Image (tube, rainbow, N blue to C red):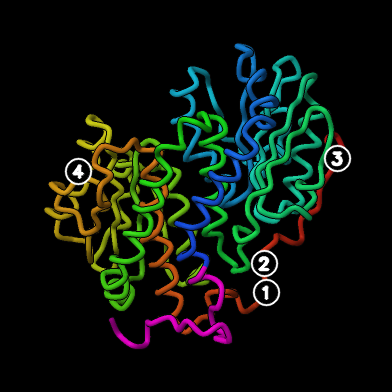
Amino acid sequence: MPDALLVPETPDNDAQPFTRREIAQQPVTLRETQALLSANKAAIEAFVGPLLARPDLRVILTGAGTSAFIGECLAPWLSRELGRTVEAIATTDIVSGPTLHLRREAPTLLVSFGRSGSSPESIAAADLVDAHVDEAFHLVITCNAEGALGQRSGENIHVVVLPEATHDRGFAMTSSFSAMMLAALSILGGIDRLVPRIEAIAAAVQGVISSVEPLIADLAGRGFKRVVYLGSGPFKGLAREAALKLMELSDGALVTAFDTALGFRHGPKTIINAETLAVVFVSNDPLTRLYDLDIAQELRSDGRSGAVVVISAQPRDNAQVVIADMAGAVDADLLFPFIVPAQLFGLHVSLALGLAPDRPNASGTVNRVVQGVRIHAPGA
């Protein structure tokens, strides 16, 4: 690995003391998150259980930016697991058009994700749900007990504050993303059901962190100008998060895109040229994976891209990144190890560009907690 891309461990390194450590701590924070949920299982299930037992309950997963993409990853999976429609609707969409997204007669559980829990849209979205829905309930999953979401209370509200270490101090959300996603998967999918899977998930994340860096460092040094992430089902949302992570940490220097394996051919494939890196997340679902492998093979056969990287849990897939011991895992569990290469790639590209990953946007026009948002009253 080139010395210029090594990340010093010293805490007084001003360039990136937090981002690297927050990526690396995910095996620990995932285990701690599940332990916290298990310890508070009775209270959590006393709130959520009766709601999920209602056939008329509408479930909305919400947040802004990376927090919204948690919902996009989990909504299709949870819809199947719960036998009901689970929707991912960003707070930014709810706030700008509440009458398009909220139904007064539909009892609604709003699951709010927030690293800081203080984004203006997060607070406004919760208030709008209360105002526009006759029976509104709130499950708050946050990394910050002191944030506005973390401070909410009431009979229709349950707040889950994750371990303090998940409150990422770096600009880009990494361990906060994976911890909040795990919390929602566990709470809505069954805390006891996730307990026997958490060790395999955490071990897989650690395995990627320990093994993938030489590949990532090489890719970051190749000077790609465009990067596209492709994924199907739950991995469409993950592809969107991966694209955002690179955009954030490169301060917009690289053009990033995301799509599904099948959707990519319908126009977006024009992004491919000799300066494009294409990354394909391969599903473990027997049908879905065939489409993922088809697009990976097509991109390789076309010979137009700068590189094609396949991330898979199946050793037979000719993948550059193979997630060890997860060949039999469900796709929801693969979300956690699959995102690590994208997080590390963003970090290494940031360093290669001479940026400070903890604050890559030196102009200050983009902030860790969003600023400049004016909340307008509906009908004003």
Tell which tag, 1 or 4, sits nearer the viewer. 4
Mark-to-mark CA distance, 1 and 3: 28 Å
The answer to whether 135 appears left or right of 17 in the picture is right
**Res 279 quadrant in image:** bottom left
The answer to which of marks 1 and 3 sits earlier in the sequence is 1
**Res 154 quadrant in image:** top right
How crowded is the residue under tag 1: few (<14 C-alpha within 10 Å), some, or many (20+)?
Answer: few
Residue that badge 3 annotates: 377
Q: Residue at x 31, y 44 (%)?
A: 264
Q: Quadrant of the C terminus?
A: top right
**Res 104 quadrant in image:** top right
- Report helix, strand or loop for mark 4: helix
Residue that badge 1 annotates: 364
Mark 3 is on which residue type?
A: Ala
Residues in magenta, as a range: 1-21
- Report helix, strand or loop for mark 1: loop
Residue that badge 4 annotates: 293
- Report helix, strand or loop for mark 3: loop
Residue that badge 2 annotates: 367
The answer to whether 304 appears left or right of 267 in the picture is left
Across and down, in percent, residue 146 comes to 79, 55
